[in-house]
Image: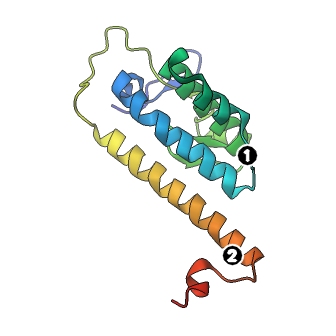
Amino acid sequence: RGVQGHALGVKTCHPAASTPRRMALDLPLLLDLCKALDAEKGMDSNPIVDRVEAVGDDVEVSVKVDALVHYLRRVHLMCYYRAEEYNDVGDMIRKGAASLVRPKLDGVATEEGKESEWERSLISRIKRRIALALENKGMCEAAGAGGMTAQQAGGS
């Protein structure tokens, strides 16, 4: 279905993003992504991630997801639902990602049990970005310890 327009200029992502199934799957991905991007930038602690992990079941999954999506936008200039990063806030606004939100599901039929192509693509791109961030962090750490990557240090 793609992105839907709104009279206020707010755009909504794929309806699957608002299903309980998708949000439950997004939460651990979001936590991993936030931690990986933070580590890539040398950030040792993240009070938002710590708080989301600490509250457990006392807070709805949708609230946790929204907090982490907002954190990624504000701190890392990343739109989770597009799996895209931006150079600056202006770039994010121009490309329409600054106001991208999950849609309300009032009366919208979603195929709760099936994973859509949008979901498969999102998961794949997010996992690739997490792997890249961890790889970049490893290279930075290796460079700081003599300028060799982990592969070079291992002799391969």
Residue nearest the viewer, comparing 91 with 64 = 64
Q: Which residue is depicted at the point 75% across and 83% down?
A: 146
Residue at the bottom extreme, as displayed: 155
Say which of marks 1 and 2 sits in front.
Answer: 2
Q: Which residue is depicted at the point 45% across and 52% down?
A: 127
Q: In which image quadrant can residue 21 be found?
A: top left
Q: Residues within 10 Å of mark 1 (few under 14, many from 20)?
A: few
- For disc 1, the marked residue is 88
Q: In which image quadrant can residue 53 be found?
A: top right
- For disc 2, the marked residue is 142
Q: Amino acid at mark 1?
A: Asp
Disc 1, SS: loop
User: Residue 45: x percent and y percent?
Assistant: 74, 44
Disc 2, SS: helix
- The answer to whether 56 is drawn above or below residue 80 in the figure is above
User: Residue 50: x percent and y percent?
Assistant: 66, 34
- The answer to whether 124 is drawn above or below residue 59 in the figure is below
- The answer to whether 153 is drawn above or below residue 18 in the figure is below
Q: How is the image coloured?
A: rainbow
- The answer to whether 40 is drawn above or below residue 29 in the figure is below
Residue 18 can be seen, yes or no: yes
Residue at the top extreme, as displayed: 107
Q: Amino acid at mark 2?
A: Ala
* Quarter of the image with the N terminus in it: top left
Tag 1–tag 2 contact (CB < 8 Å): no
User: Residue 115: x percent and y percent?
Assistant: 27, 37
